Amino acid sequence: MTTDLPAAPLTFTPRYQTRVWGGRLFETALGRTLPDDRPYGESWELSDRPDCQSVVATGALAGTTLHDLWSRHRRAIFGDALANHPAVRFPLLVKALDCADDLSIQVHPPAAIAPALAGEPKSEMWHFVGVRPGARLYAGLRRGVTRDRFQAALSAGTVAECVHALEPAVGDSLMVHSGRLHALGGGLLVFEIQQNSDTTYRVFDWNRVGLDGRPRQLHVAESLRCIDFDDFEPDLHRAADGNPLASCTHFRVDRHPGATPVPSSGMRLVMAVDRLSWAGTVIAPGSVALWPACLPPAPEIGGGAWLEIVV
């Protein structure tokens, strides 16, 4: 099936997720058509989750799931470097986030703790593509905050006073390692690359209710086991700092300007910041495109800026 593919990237149909903190930026800023008038906070652009599968949108493989590509055609699509990767599912999850309101203050479990909590470890990076004036985010603890002080703030409802606040600009990025306390603030449009995990522990949610009108579940005990209490006041990676935007043992993300040659042959994974044209295929902002390893080296990408995601 994979040996007769046309020389074009694979693109995928987004899967939209409603969130109490979501809005309509996928429609107004990214030019998407949303399913209804509810608040949409997440668009899963590349997902190999049991309950949310990315599907190839067009071409010879249209309708094929990402999991099928990974499990049945791994070497042809993803190349020799990933042919023996131990993950049963594609190891990354790529999203766009519309943060119309503040997200909960939360943490993801480190690998050493996740199994004991029946969760999955999760490190992620954020790349900011839309920033409303005055918008901010929270990441890490304010210097001097101890575990005891944090627990006292939980009881007093003043957790936000313990978390380091930052004001990003368009083009900035932040690496959020598992164990880092964090929250995105209202007014941000974010592209997120993360481990393939959906485990999040909310420690504080601004005393609000969910879309069903009931208070959202908190995970205070789990959060206290996961928070890195030595993680103080991290800095943003500013746009002028260059590549990589973020790098960890699970992925690397670089940003490239328009009309840029693809760095090398083999499988290439790209997320469009601006509208792109790649081998005759139009890739809309926020969308992910994958150049299969079995094809000849990928041609130059035309248009605006794009993110290269290296697994």
Image: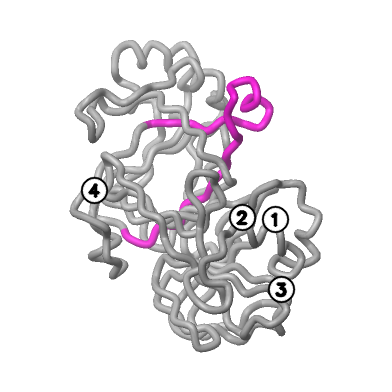
Residue sitting at x 40%, y 78%: 275
Q: Position of residue 72 (x, y in %)?
A: 71, 60
The residues colored magenta run 105-130
**Camera-nearest residue between 174 and 59:** 59
Q: Quadrant of residue 65?
A: bottom right
Q: Which of the two discs, 4 and 1, sits closer to the camera?
A: 1
How busy is the neighbourhood of tag 3: few (under 14 within 10 Å), some, or many (20 plus)? many
Q: Amino acid at mark 2?
A: His
- For the C terminus, the image quarter is bottom right
Residue carrying label 3: 293
Amino acid carrying mark 3 in the image: Ala
Residue where numbered disc 1 is placed = 71
Residue 35: x and y in percent read 26, 58
Residue 168 shows up from this direction = no
Residue 11 in the image: state x and y as whole percent.
51, 71
Residue occupying the point 46% across, 75% down: 305
Secondary structure at badge 4 equals loop
- Is the residue under label 2 in contact with that under label 4 (CB below 8 Å)? no
- Label annotation for residue 39: 4
In the picture, the disc for residue 41 is none
- The residue identified by callout 2 is 67
Q: Nearer the viewer, mark 1 or mark 3?
A: 1
